Image (cartoon, grey):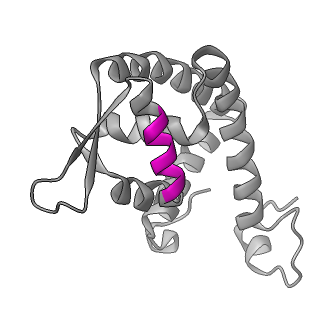
Amino acid sequence: MFCSYAEIMTVDKLDLEHFLPYQLNVLAARLSRGLAQIYQQRFGITIPEWRVIAHLARENAISVRDIAARVDMDKPKITRAAQRLEQAGLVSKKIDAQDRRLVMLALTSKGRRLYGEIEGLALSYERDMLARLPPDIAACLREGVMRLNRGEDVRSHGSLR
C-alpha cells in the first residue's frame, strides 16, 4: 500500500490493485450495486431508472440527451428507462417547444414522492460508506473525487492528504 504522494507518483509498473482509474471504477460499481439493491427491493426500479429520477429531481424538465451527458450512460438505455418510468406514472414527457426533436422529461408528483423516499435511503447509504473512513480522509476523498470529476488539476490546489 502507498503511504505518500511521492510513492504514488513514482510507480513505474501498472498494478491494477493500485491503479486509481481501475480501483475507482471497481469501487463505483460496487457502491452503485449496493445502493441499487436497496431501491430495487423496495421500489422495483433499476439503476438507469434511478439515475433518470435523480437527475430529473434537480431540474424542472430535462432532455434525454442532457441526462446522457451527465450520467455517462448511453441514450438508448436512458430512453428505455424513461419509457418504463412514464408507464409507471413517475415521469411525464413532452416535446420541446423550441427544438421539436427534443423530448423533455419531468417528474410527476408520484415521481417526486418516490425520489423523496429514495433520497433518504441514498444519503444514509452514503453516510454509512463514509463512516468507514476517518473523517479527514472521508472529506478529502469527497473533495478529490469532485475535483477530478470537474476536470480540475488537483495539484494546483494543494495536497488532498
Q: Residue at x 80, y 72 (%)?
A: 7
Instruction: From the viewer's side, name the closer residue of 84 and 50.
Output: 84
Instruction: Return the x and y of residue 132 as percentages of the image width and height.
Output: 72, 30
Residue 102 shows up from this direction:
yes
Asked whether 151 or 40 is in front, the reply is 40
Q: Quadrant of residue 93?
A: top left
| Residues in magenta, as a range | 76-84
Residue 24 picture location, percent across and down:
70, 56
Residue at image point 27% right, 52% down: 103
Q: Which residue is at the far left?
A: 98
Q: Is residue 118 left or right of residue 27?
A: left
**For residue 115: magenta?**
no
Residue 135 sits above or below residue 7 on the image: above
Q: Main secondary structure of the magenta part?
A: helix
Along the line of sight, the residue nearer the viewer: 19 or 85:
85
Residue 95 lies left or right of residue 156; in this view the side is left
Determine whether 148 is above or below 142 in the image: below
On the image, which quarter does residue 101 sit in? bottom left
The reply to whether residue 4 is visible in this rendering is no
Looking at the picture, does residue 144 appear above or below residue 9?
Answer: above
Quadrant assignment for the C terminus? bottom right
Where's the N terminus, which quadrant? bottom right
Q: Position of residue 91 (x, y in %)?
A: 35, 31
Q: Quadrant of residue 60?
A: top left
Q: Is residue 77 magenta?
A: yes
**Total marks in image:** 0
